[in-house]
Amino acid sequence: MPAPRPPQPETPARDAFEIHRSEVAPGLELGYLREGVGGYPLLLVHGYPETKRIWWRNVRPLVAAGYEVIVPDLRGYGDSDLSATDDYDLTLYSHDLHTLVHEVLGHGSCGLVGGDVGGVVLCDLANRFPGFVDRMVFFNTVAPVIPEAADWYAQHGLSMAALEDGPTGDYRIRQGRDPEELLAELDTPARRRQWVRDFYEHRLLASPYSFDEADYDFMVEPFEDARRLAAAWAPYQLAYDRPMSEAPLLAQPVRVETLILYGPDDQVVPADFPKRCEIAFPNRVGPLVIPECGHFLQWERADVLNGVCRHFFSDLRSR
């Protein structure tokens, strides 16, 4: 029998939250949750293979703590529109989210929380829109690589590569270099569901027994659509000459105050992640290592993330 995992907040029903829609670019709307209107705004940004559903255990506890919780699907994911012109990249994600929070919802600034692709987008948001990001919580993703600090990386035995391929990282090559071939193999909804489920189960991203059958079904359902699965692979294709609208601002430090968290059971984001964050985030808290946790920290240890967010942003609630 597996050892019992730390108890987690209750998972709300699939239809627990109202889904809003707003246009953030010509002809493109994002689907998003907005709960706790009137509190200090927190923007929670998912990655891949996730949608806004990965934050289901975080919304109500953060609303109860006094926050306005904004949880979008990135363009092409979940309830957000696909791009009619196949335009997907990190900078476009960043512009979409800034437009949503700043122009549509009317917030001059906000707090950010994210990991995986969402964490990378957080860094671009912080560097691209000065004054927009008050603070951020950053976990289990690729830290900015600072070319001017090459000597520092060498002294600490770190390569200048943003992310080395680990034992289960072959998916990055297939989704990035050979997406058409891979999509042809995943030619049924069941096969597409299985491809995504493997990230939560067999690819060693999560701490063991973090997800049960109902959780798998909840997380993989949005990727049954081949168009949405293909759209989600776009960030991986940027390493294989996919055109981008503009280079993301990821080769410079992020000077916004940032709390660094790391789930060490993640076998895709390597153990050097905390060390890399020490140079990428000069105004940081941590890195803090969260036990019994892997890549999906916001779900696997929602109890920890909800608690640290409640305190890390607490003085901003008086705004």
Image: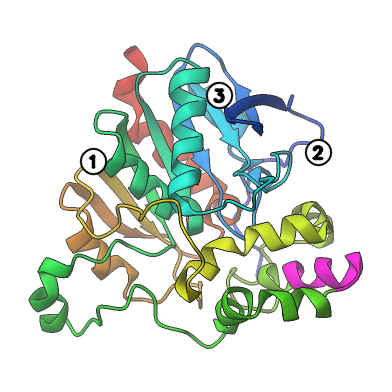
Q: Which residue is mark 1?
A: 256
**Nearer to me, 261 or 190:** 190
| Residue 195 belongs to the span the image colors magenta | yes
**Nearer to me, 81 or 307:** 81
Q: Residue at image x 16%, y 77%?
A: 153
Q: In this image, 146 relative to 2: left or right?
A: left
Q: Residue at image x 61%, y 79%?
A: 171
Q: Secondary structure at mark 2?
A: loop
**Nearer to me, 169 or 292:** 169
Q: Residues within 10 Å of mark 3 (few under 14, many from 20)?
A: many
Over which residues does the magenta segment extend? 187-197
Q: What numbered label is drawn on residue 126?
A: none
> Disc 3 vs disc 2: which is toward the camera?
2
Q: Cα distance, mark 3 to mark 1?
A: 24 Å
> Disc 3 vs disc 1: which is toward the camera?
1
Q: Secondary structure at mark 3?
A: helix
Q: Position of residue 308 (x, y in %)?
A: 40, 41
Q: Cα distance, mark 3 to mark 2?
A: 18 Å
Q: Residue at image x 54%, y 81%?
A: 169
Q: Is residue 248 above or below residue 235?
A: above
Amino acid at pointer 3: Val
Q: Position of residue 292 (x, y in %)?
A: 52, 65
Tell me the colour scheme of the image: rainbow
Q: What numbered label is drawn on residue 14?
A: 2
